[in-house]
């Protein structure tokens, strides 16, 4: 059978899944475990991914790359020994590990889908695709994590799912909340909100701060953050989800007790931030709490009791959990990969099972361009941001706006692609995704037509063009090109076959 897989590239843990002979998604195990730590270290001049670096993460004397998903698309450097890596490099190493797990189970991967947070900026989406290429994975599609989770839940429940649902996805590093409308196994995303730096890693650091503060009150010994491994905090956090208080041995000499109440007080602001985003996504979707049929959980941090109480408070109901909240995103990605595969790659039973599924995604940001407009109130010309594709618009889509040259004999246009979380017209409140120049022929009057076209594909990847209508001159950019210039020398040594 063709090896078609879905990969959840997680902040703290990653997973890979496929579909079985009758079309059901199933996790591909890594030495008996369903999930693999997204941690990387160098040992004997070789990159090691998984449990060994996870144990050493945050301990004094060890250099471990972790939580780098939060930095995807940013200019950042992670030092491991004498080498420096980008977040894309280390993500490629984790993806190669996922590839190895999948290929040990079913042979070479023919097609793969990788998940990303819905709140990922375009640069982070592009960087994820670059990481997949470095890892030698043929990725045709990516899918937003909450959408993948919703796909799995709807597949599992079948026609019993009907109406509007919340997908609450709180993992190790990122938070997404989406409103989806389900009609059996058909899913339409109505709205999504989120933040790229909110999750279990923040909870772990809060727990470590509690222990440090308590220890420093009773001991003269000097203890720093590096003396308390974050991997220990993750385990302690799990215990606090089951018990009211737990002990932790610091510096081999002092037993510190932490209560659940102390932990919940420390993370209250983080939980409140998630609540605010939940309320914002309801407003964006124009949906009342009373219309929500259920809250679907994804991500290991949804096991924290304070988080579950918060969900029940905001949505007036207990969430719908899964026995495997760490795995639902990968399982949904496997379903999506099968959906997008050629029917010839599936057997008849698989094809019949997958044919029932349908997903409709949306743009997660506003995208526009800068132009000079006349402000009648101030009687001046001023720089303004014009929205071309709006947040919440169904994708794939293509939109064109028309502009005019400003001056006689104008020979160039400064072309900019902007993005924002709200429909901003003020250039101060948008960020520039890309900037380039469209050269124009001289000797023309002002007012020549310039057409700006933005087009989203099924992956949420955008292509932009700036066209001078009269001359046919055009400047085009595929936004994944932005990340292609990243240096690969540091990582290529480790990703060779």
Image (cartoon, rainbow, N blue to C red):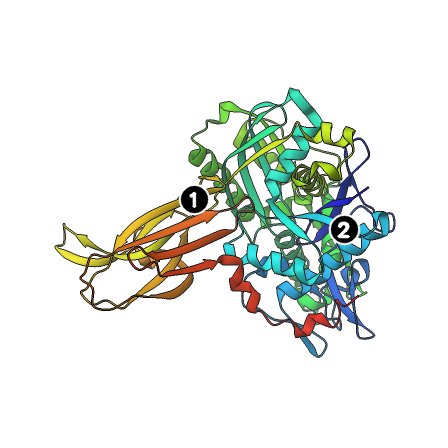
Residue named by callout 1: 398
Q: Quadrant of residue 348?
A: top right
Question: What number of labels is visible?
Answer: 2
Residue 67 appears in view? no
Secondary element at image label 1: strand
Q: Is residue 200 visible?
A: yes
The residue drawn where x is 46% and y is 59% is 477
Nearer the observer, 214 or 74: 74
Left or right of residue 409: residue 475:
right
Of 30 and 340, the residue lying toward us: 340
Q: Which mark is residue 440?
A: none
User: Residue 405 versus residue 225: which sits nearer the camera?
Assistant: 405
**Residue at the image position 71 percent from the left and 56 percent from the top:** 137
- Tell me if 457 is positioned left or right of 64 in this view: left
Query: Where is 293 relative to 482, above or below?
Result: above
Q: Residues within 10 Å of mark 1 (few under 14, many from 20)?
A: some
Disc 2 secondary structure class? strand
Pinpoint residue 215: horizontal percent, then vertical percent: 69, 62
Q: CA distance from mark 1 to mark 2?
A: 32 Å
Residue found at the very far left of the displayed protein: 379
Residue that lies at the very extreme toward the front in this rendered image = 471
In front of the other: 87 or 367: 367
**Quarter of the image with the N terminus in it:** top right
Disc on the earlier residue, 1 or 2: 2
| Residue that carries the numbered disc 2 in the rendered image | 109
Q: Residue at x 39, y 66 (%)?
A: 436
Q: x, y (%) of residue 387?
A: 35, 48
Where is 95 relative to 193, above or below? Answer: below
Task: Name which quarter of the figure residue 360 lies in.
Answer: top right
């Amino acid at each position: 059978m063709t090896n078609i897989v879905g990969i959840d590239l997680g902040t703290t843990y990653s997973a890979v899944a496929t579909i079985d002979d009758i079309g059901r998604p199933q996790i591909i195990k890594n030495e008996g475990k369903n999930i693999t730590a997204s941690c990387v270290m160098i040992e004997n001049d070789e990159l090691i991914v998984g449990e060994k670096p996870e144990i050493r993460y945050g301990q004094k004397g060890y250099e471990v790359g972790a939580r780098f998903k939060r930095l995807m698309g940013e200019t950042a450097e992670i030092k491991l020994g004498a080498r420096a890596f980008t977040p894309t490099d280390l993500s490629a190493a984790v993806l190669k590990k996922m590839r190895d797990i999948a290929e040990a189970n079913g042979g070479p991967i023919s097609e793969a889908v990788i998940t990303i947070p819905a709140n990922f900026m375009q640069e982070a989406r592009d960087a994820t695709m670059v990481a997949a290429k470095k890892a030698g994975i043929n990725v045709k599609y990516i899918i937003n994590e909450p959408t993948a989770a919703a796909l799995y839940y709807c597949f599992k429940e079948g026609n019993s799912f009907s109406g509007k649902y919340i997908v609450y996805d709180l993992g190790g590093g990122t938070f997404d909340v989406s409103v989806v409308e389900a009609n059996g196994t058909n899913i339409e995303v109505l709205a999504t909100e989120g933040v790229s730096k909110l999750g279990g890693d923040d909870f772990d650091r809060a727990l470590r701060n509690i222990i440090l503060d308590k220890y420093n009150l009773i001991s003269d010994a000097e203890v720093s953050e590096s003396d308390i491994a974050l991997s220990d905090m993750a385990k302690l956090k799990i215990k606090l989800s089951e018990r009211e208080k737990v002990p932790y041995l610091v510096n081999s000499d002092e037993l510190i007790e932490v209560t659940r109440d102390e932990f919940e007080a420390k993370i209250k602001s983080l939980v409140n931030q998630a609540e605010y985003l939940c309320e914002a996504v309801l407003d964006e979707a124009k949906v009342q709490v009373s219309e929500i049929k259920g809250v679907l959980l994804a991500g290991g941090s949804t096991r924290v009791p304070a988080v579950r109480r918060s969900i029940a408070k905001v949505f007036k109901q207990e969430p719908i959990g899964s026995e495997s909240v760490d795995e639902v995103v990968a399982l949904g990605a496997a379903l999506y990969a099968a959906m997008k595969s050629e029917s010839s790659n599936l057997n008849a039973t698989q094809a019949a099972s997958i044919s029932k599924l349908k997903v409709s995604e949306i743009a997660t940001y506003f995208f526009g361009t800068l132009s000079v407009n006349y402000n009648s109130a101030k009687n001046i010309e001023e720089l303004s941001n014009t929205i071309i594709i709006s947040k919440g618009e169904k994708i794939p889509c293509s939109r064109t706006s028309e502009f005019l040259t400003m001056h006689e004999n104008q020979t160039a246009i400064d072309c900019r692609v902007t993005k924002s979380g709200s429909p901003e017209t003020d250039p101060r409140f948008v960020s520039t995704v890309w900037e380039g120049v469209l050269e124009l022929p001289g000797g023309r009057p002002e007012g020549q037509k310039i057409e700006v076209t933005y087009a989203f594909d099924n992956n949420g990847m955008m292509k932009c063009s700036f066209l001078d209508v009269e001359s046919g001159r055009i400047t085009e950019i595929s936004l994944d090109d932005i990340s292609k210039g990243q240096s690969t020398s540091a990582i290529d040594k480790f990703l060779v076959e």
